[in-house]
Image (cartoon, rainbow, N blue to C red):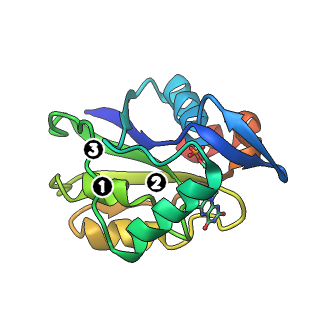
Amino acid sequence: MKEIIIYYSRTGENYVNGSIKTLTKGNTEVAAEMLKKLTGADLFQLEQVNHYSNDYNVCINEAKKDQRENARPKLKAVPENLLEYDTIYLGYPNYWGSMPMAVFTFLEQFDFTGKTIRPFCTHEGSGMGTSESDIQKTCPSATVEKGLPLHGANVIHAEQQIKKWIK
Ligand SMILES: Cc1cc2nc3c(=O)[nH]c(=O)nc-3n(C[C@H](O)[C@H](O)[C@H](O)COP(=O)(O)O)c2cc1C
């Protein structure tokens, strides 16, 4: 059986060790690509139809509003099916202690019976937050393993941590 890495990540302004920088590649994408290199798994990016703003402060508010309203932002695409995969690595940034609402949009579209979800997230201090239990609640028939929290600003140094976790 095959493995797939499905991730959500945002480019644009973000805090990097205390100052705002414009990232051309999101932190979770960096981690997802490392994971791909180490596992050989397929890779799929979840993208919202309506991207959150490149402006950090605007994005913060857009994402907060979506979370407060329990919104399901539309995705540009999802994998055609997950039948051939038994393990799904699911990557996302920690947003307000959980996941971007678009990750819920994805999870609700598939049947995860018999599948293992291995979550990983990038964050600035909150670790996995409630995301692991949020995934389990959304996908009750999946086996949700303990996730890997990575510090977003230092993600380029995360390869050893990822290597240890995938074993
Ligand atoms: C809307 C929004 C909400 C966030 N909320 C949290 C949070 O609650 N806890 C935390 O540790 N980091 C939080 N962050 C920081 C991100 O999790 C962190 O920068 C992450 O590495 C971004 O990943 P990306 O570049 O792949 O999008 C938030 C960032 C954004 C944009």
For image coordinates 25% across by 65% down, the residue present is 139
Residue 89: x and y in percent read 41, 44
User: CA separation, marks 3 and 1?
Assistant: 6 Å
Q: Are marks 3 and 1 in contact (CB under 8 Å)?
A: yes
Height in image: 34 above or below 64?
Answer: above
Q: Are marks 2 and 1 in contact (CB under 8 Å)?
A: no
Nearest to viewer (mark 2 / mark 1): 1
- Horizontal relation, residue 62 to residue 164: left or right: left
- Depth check: give the residue in front, 150 or 95: 95
Residue receiving disc 1 = 73
Residue 95: x and y in percent read 53, 62
Residue receiving disc 3 = 75
Residue receiving disc 2 = 119
For image coordinates 19% across by 39% down, the residue present is 82
Residue 128: x and y in percent read 57, 64
Q: Amino acid at mark 3?
A: Leu
Q: Secondary structure at mark 3?
A: loop
For image coordinates 61% across by 38% down, the residue present is 12
Q: Secondary structure at mark 1?
A: loop
> Ligand 1, what quadrant?
bottom right
Q: Are marks 3 and 2 in contact (CB under 8 Å)?
A: no
User: CA separation, marks 2 and 1?
Assistant: 20 Å
Q: Quadrant of residue 84?
A: top left
